Amino acid sequence: MSLSTQTLKSQLQALSSKRVSSVELVQEQITRAQAINADNNAFISFNADGALEQAKQADQARADGSTQPLLGAPIAHKDLFCTQGQVTTCGSKILQNFVAPYNATVVENLTQAGAISIGKTNMDEFAMGSSNENSAFGAVKNPWDLDRVPGGSSGGSAAAVAAGMVAAATATDTGGSIRQPAAFTGTSGIKPTYGRCSRYGMIAYASSLDQAGPIAQTAEDLAIMLGAMASHDPRDSTSATEGTEDFTRDLGRSVEGLRIGLPRQFFTEQLDDAVASTTHQALAELEKRGAVLVDIDLANIDLSLPAYYVIAPAEASANLSRFDGVRFGYRCENPKDLNDLYERSRSEGFGEEVKRRILVGTYALSASFFDAYYVKAQQIRRLIKNDFVAAFEQVDLIAGPTTPTPAFKLGEKTDDPSDMYLQDVYTISANLAGIPGLSIPAGQVAGMPVGLQLLGNYFDEARMLGVAHQFQQITDWHSRRPEVSL
Amino acid sequence: MMWETVIGLEIHTQLATESKIFSGSSTEFGQSPNTQANAVDLGLPGILPVPNQKAFEYAAMFGMAIGATVNQRSTFDRKNYFYPDLPKGYQTTQLFHPIVEHGQVEIRIDDTLRTIGVTRAHLEEDAGKSLHEDFDGMTGIDLNRAGTPLIEIVSEPDMRSAKEAVAYLKKIHAIVRYLGICDGNMAEGSFRCDANVSVRIKGTEAFGNRVEVKNINSFKFVEKAINHEVERQIERIEDGGTIVQETRLYDPDRDETRSMRSKEEANDYRYFPCPDLLPVELSDEFLAQVRERLPELPEAKAKRLIEQFGITDYDAAVVTSDRALAEYFERAAEHSGSGKLAANWVLGAVSQWLNDSDSNIEACPVSAERLGDLIQRISDDTLNSKGAKAVWEAMLTSDASVDELIESLGLKQVTDTGAIEAVVEQVMADNAGQVEAYRAAEPDKQGKMVGFFVGQVMKASGGKANPQAVNQILRSKLGG
């Protein structure tokens, strides 16, 4: 088996034992990724020359005795993380030529840890979408079935990991954008506690919900990645003082006696039967190893989706105002006056879904509807948070399906936005409450992967990753890879 | 019909912090365009604001100075509108939970004290500048000012005349200058004012529709713009029209206001809490430290000056209207040992110079200590008032000491009784008829008649005789 399709952990071991040089591994990874990209479109841009140059330096650093945790390992960044001197598009025409003059803190942290980015992964424009069909650079295809979507918005990162284009990639999750694509592609992904990773240099969609996290093949790789990504950042006022920690510390911990809550509201008729039974089988594996399954109620969870679709578009409507054609980004040809410049630059630069959410958000914030929508949604948000706080007094973790169905076909839901929004029905509440959530492969339905979601208490990522790792010790769903033609 | 004017002011006060409210860029005025705008100020994608603690300290100082509530928890909101000098497409401000609320200041109009309520003072970021000249049909954008911290000070609609509005504006100006939180420079835009103006029939409760008058950026224009707007509104109503709620721009060149936008055209700013900034919590300890550093404020200073130097309420109020002027007075009073004379000079010759030179006290060529020297020479009768005035004029252009100037100008007052007696005797001999008349007159008439002799003696002495000594000697000799 080629090293380029193996886990990050295996690659790091190969590098540290000098079985392979970083230059060799990075070159192999880029060659493979570029070949596959023609089919699945997981990458928007590659940084081959820069990556190989860094790989040379990494090999030199290792020869000089450096022990950086990710030294020489190839990864990829979702294209909403600003990377200094490289184009950062956010999946949008409006930023198609935007070169960031700074690195996002997450990028900087991974670079400091020795990781090498081979390129930027595709995504739904401004992270708005659940299928990766909303990219100005074309849809991403699911490596398990090129007629199906990889999920979104971090569809590029998930497809890249699933297809072995890179062992691990950064991603972001505002309502499920890490967990849903991880579930659709048979990969593992974690959205940490809000504030765990700095948002500095991460192009904002909905600031109070956005959170960075990794997608990789295994929980162990997630722990390694997250350890390098997380930090307290004085440049982000909402970044948590907890900073980073050793997220691998609980990997060996037994699930014996672990109390896992199963929200009744997650197992209803909107959940696909096959996905439901796959989820129950996965939970039964944990039960066999001594975990205790407890039915719980999250009474207000059904209100998550409507609350999210007020708060997220409201914040987005303001966050995206800066893309006005004045200082950077796309500008329309020959504007006849200021309003024309604004209207045409934004109309031509933004895609349909982005425009839809800006309009929804603008409406929700307008003086006559503010109380009825925004204020109400924030009240619901508090109720949902309270539900989780109460639940975590009874149980250690909450588990359930990541998505209602496996990956759907390209084009299947593009005409029905509200059906598309239902994709996030199980994932969105974690963003509203700010708690961590992860998705790991739990089985397959008709040859397509299905995810198991674990939700944890604030800053309890290490324990969640431990449970996920234990699950991956007794199952092999995470190591099943789609057949990819080169 | 008797009309009553109702005025409320919104004052934008730039805080004198070294760096911006959410970025590390310098706030210095007058630098080349866009040299003080970093990625935060430009609103580049992915960039986040980090609050500047100094701005909170300054806002808290202002709140304490006007006896307001300084909220220990305040939050930031976004005010959304598109304009090229507003890089993010929203202004970060405090709508829902401002840092300062419910304060008040006292103003004095003639001899009446009035209390003006301050509804709130909130922190926000300034926008950049749009430069419509010099670009041949295009607009230049300078973002150096973008992100400069402001407190917007919003008054209650408590003022009833343009004069009161000016007095209030001056009072707030004095306070922020005393606190050292704003340089108060209206020409550079550090201290700007919008006025909400309405009229109603005297005795009625309900407010008339208000008009917001913008762009009134000097004390002089505030009064003119408000008076103009009041006249316009009254005229319109008396002609059978109505006042529409709108924003009008004051044009100082034409001394008129013109409509900028009506209520219907007004932006819906879609305020909502800024998700990039956590609520700001000010600890008891922080506020105690701020309170400790609070300088003496105009009212307290006036009270102390009255007690310490025996000056009048009026003099104290005028002298303390500006912190630097008050400090100048205090040094001159201490140095000379005469508070009353120092007050007379500061309010007289010194204020005259400030007006004539359109300058501030820091630029005055006569230091407080030199003025003190001059006052000493008046107190010890070396100079009479006319001579003192001449020395003052000379001091404005010369660095020579007061004594040197008295010497070189030959202004030393004659207090030698023998010398004055000789002159008095000479004048009486030259004006024997008047002496006769004086002696024949009723005592109550004599008081007036002595003035003639004083004038003659002063003239004969070349203005150098001490007037009191002259008076005393004359009365005794004429009585003889």
Image (cartoon, helix red, strand yellow):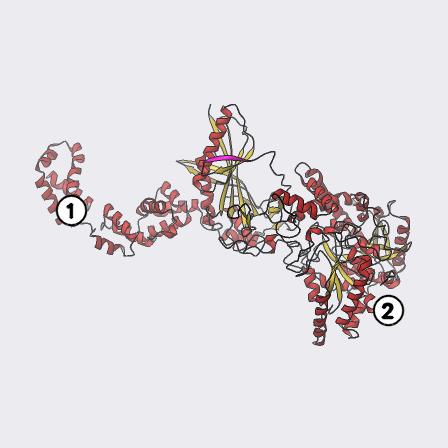
Q: Quadrant of residue A54?
A: bottom right
Q: Amino acid at mark 1?
A: Ser
Q: Considering the image in quadrants, where does the C terminus of chain B appear?
A: top left
Q: Which residues are magenta?
A: B254-270
The count of marks equals 2
Position of residue B167 in the picture relative to residue B374 (left or right): right
- Secondary structure beneath label 2: loop
Placement of A428 over or under A53, stated as above or below: above
Q: Amino acid at mark 2?
A: Met
- The disc at residue B129 is none
In which chain is the residue bearing label 2?
Answer: A
Residue that numbered label 2 is attached to: A1
Q: In this view of the protein, which residue sits in the foreground, B314 or A18?
A: A18
Find out whether residue A154 is within the magenta segment. Answer: no
Q: Residues within 10 Å of mark 2 (few under 14, many from 20)?
A: few
Q: Residues within 10 Å of mark 1 (few under 14, many from 20)?
A: some
Placement of B230 over or under B143, stated as above or below: above
- Secondary structure beneath label 1: loop
Find out whether residue B256 is within the magenta segment. Answer: yes
Q: Nearer the viewer, mark 1 or mark 2?
A: 2
Residue that numbered label 1 is attached to: B461
Q: In this view of the protein, which residue sits in the foreground, A434 or B135?
A: B135
Q: Disc 1 and disc 2: Cα gap in Å?
A: 120 Å
In which chain is the residue bearing label 1?
Answer: B
- Asked if disc 1 and disc 2 are in contact, CB closer than 8 Å, the reply is no
Q: Is residue B172 visible?
A: yes
Q: Residue at x 46, y 41 (%)?
A: B169
Task: Kindly indicate whether the residues beneath marks 1 and 2 are on one polypeptide chain.
Answer: no
How far from the left and from the top, in percent, is residue A367?
65, 38
